[in-house]
Amino acid sequence: MSGLNETPRANRLHIGFFGKRNSGKSSLINAFAKQDISIVSDVAGTTTDPVYKSMEILPLGPCVLIDTAGFDDIGELGETRVEKTKLAAEKTDIAVVLVSGDELSKEKEWFDYFVDRKIPVMLCISKADTLENPEEYKSFVEKEFKAAPIVLSSKTKEGLPEFKEQLLRSLPEDFEMPSITGDLCGENDLVMLVMPQDIQAPKGRLILPQVQTIRELLDKKCVVISCTTDKIDQTLSTLKNSPKLIICDSQVFKTVWEKKPDESRITSFSTLFAGYKGDIEYYIEGAESIDKLDESSKILIAECCTHAPLSEDIGREKLPRLLRKRLGEGLQVDFVSGSDFPEDLTKYDLVIQCGACMFNRRYVMSRIERAKEQGVMMSNYGVVIAKLNKILDKISY
């Protein structure tokens, strides 16, 4: 289990390794990481589901290395594995494509996939020690891809220093995660957190968005005070000055809005994560589109977690209830969870996603881009709840 002092996986640089079966992906990962992360075998197809390994790699910092199944896998099970590889590609910040053999159409297809999506991609020849003429093969690959490959050998460690240098140069310029709270608060500002500890909050723990937000506020040298919803009045009465900012759980937006001091700004954890992980402006546009919907509309609610549905679950019960109260009881609401996100969104009028604290920003943005390309509006829990409570124009983000 990850400790509280560890960087959450969703905030780490994701480096994905892609290639045919038995192209040397697992061997390269093990050689690069200097430890046995993936099982290595001469049998093609040893890696089935993607393997995600969180590591600290200097000077890159906290990373996730993703070992994927061969994208040339065959059969019904093979097709399922390739789908998992495609999902891993959507989460990848830097892609490493390994080439082998003379038929490179599949490798070219995947290389172009990353280039088209402006994802940094490295081209590698991973089994240089098995080639009769590595330089000749390198020239062949370079001509096919119009890009210079790195010649590597996991066995002899040839090319590994160059590989690491190229990784550093490939670091996306925008990888630095944006601030959760942005310019809403700064040093010495008083920030009040309203955090219901109900059935959805694990006993004895805080949920990840709360933990990450508190840590950022402490790093900013803010003065942080927290309470549960039933202690708002008592907490405010003990303060000499009103909070500069109040951050609450989305489901108590209305209650907190009615009780907050006039001079205090208000937002929610989910709204903050809409900007931290996604496209806040598109989410707001998506929430505003609710005005054009009615009970014949179709809405998809996408939870990123895969927990079992709980009583009064915000995504599966509270949000649909609010939507039906506004649009009509006949409203169709579908649900997906985890990485189960439809390729075709066109049958929906709106997609509403949670705060996505468990996903990296690259993957969240890939979902948003899919919705935009298909002309489907998208929003998130906090933004939609603010809209339904008629305070969307009053919250800060």
Image (cartoon, rainbow, N blue to C red):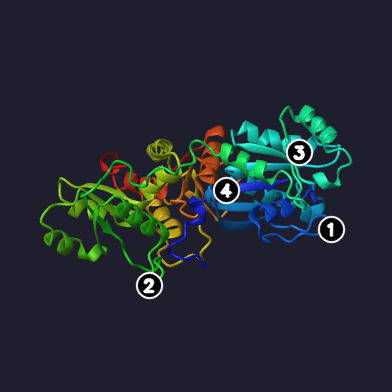
Between circles 2 and 1, the one closer to the viewer is 1
Residue type, mark 2 in image: Gly
Q: Indicate which disc, 2 or 4, sits on the residue closer to the N terminus.
A: 4
User: 371 and 319: which one is in front?
Assistant: 371
Give the spatial CA distance, label 2 vs label 1.
46 Å
Q: What is the number of the mark on residue 43?
A: 1
Q: Amino acid at mark 3?
A: Glu
Residue at the spot x=64%, y=45% of the render?
89
Tell me the SS state at disc 4.
strand
Of the image marks 1 and 3, the number of the one nearer the N terminus: 1
Coordinates of residue 275 in the picture (x, y in percent) = 40, 42
Label of residue 14 in the image: 4
Marks 2 and 4 close (CB-CB < 8 Å): no
Q: CA distance from mark 4 to mark 1?
A: 26 Å
Q: CA distance from mark 3 to mark 4?
A: 20 Å
Q: Residue lying furthest bottom in this view?
A: 204
Residue 385 percent across, percent down from the top left: 35, 49
Q: CA distance from mark 2 to mark 4?
A: 30 Å
Q: Label 2 belongs to which residue?
A: 204
Q: Where is 204 relative to 86, above or below?
A: below
Q: Residues within 10 Å of mark 4 (few under 14, many from 20)?
A: many
Q: Amino acid at mark 4?
A: His
Q: How many marks?
A: 4
Looking at this view, is 197 or 314 the one in front?
197
User: Is 31 drawn above or below residue 362 in the view shown?
Assistant: below
Q: Residues within 10 Å of mark 1 (few under 14, many from 20)?
A: few
Decide: few, some or many residues near mark 3? Use Cα within 10 Å; few <14, some 14-19, many ≥20.
many
